[in-house]
Image: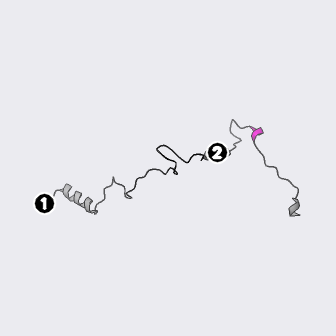
Amino acid sequence: MARSLQETRARSVKNGSLRLDRHSGSGRRGTPKKGGAGAKYTWGAPGYNEDASTPIVDRKDPNYDEDEEVIPVRSRKTPDHLK
């Protein structure tokens, strides 16, 4: 008795000689890592904030204010410990 195409395919998948395209190759879920922060929709640990760094100053920005920009001042004088 000849096997149907579906039966042959099912046996091939079961014994591993044929891989289903819709299934993951790794066998693990691809959920994003949350840094040990907890439950659903919780990203990052408490107190961790990437946006807390100093903002980028752009002189072409319409909200740019020259008075707020901090310009580092270099001294031309040689420090005493380098003499």
Q: Are marks 2 and 1 in contact (CB under 8 Å)?
A: no
Q: Where residue 56 sits in the image (x, y, percent)?
A: 67, 45
Residue 71 highlighted magenta (yes or no): yes
Q: Where residue 66 sits in the image (x, y, percent)?
A: 76, 39
The quarter of the displayed image where residue 19 is located: bottom left
Question: Which one is in front, 15 or 74?
Answer: 15
The quarter of the displayed image where residue 69 is located: top right
The quarter of the displayed image where residue 14 is located: bottom left
Question: From the viewer's perspective, is 59 left or right of 46?
Answer: right
The first of marks 2 and 1 along the sequence is 1
Circle 2 or circle 1, nearest the eye: 2
Q: Quadrant of the N terminus?
A: bottom left
Q: Point out the stretch of residues depicted in magenta.
A: 63-74
Q: Residue at x 23, y 57 (%)?
A: 10
Q: Quadrant of the C terminus?
A: bottom right
> Disc 1 residue type?
Ala
The CA span between labels 2 and 1 is 69 Å
> Disc 2 residue type?
Ala
Residue 73 highlighted magenta (yes or no): yes
Q: What kind of secondary structure does the magenta stretch mostly adopt?
A: loop
State the SS at label 2: helix
**To which residue does mark 2 refer?**
52
Question: From the viewer's perspective, is 51 left or right of 5?
Answer: right
Q: Residue at x 51, y 44 (%)?
A: 42
Q: Where residue 53 sits in the image (x, y, percent)?
A: 66, 46
**To which residue does mark 1 refer?**
2
Q: Where residue 8 sits in the image (x, y, percent)?
A: 20, 59
State the SS at label 1: loop
Q: Residue at x 22, y 60 (%)?
A: 11
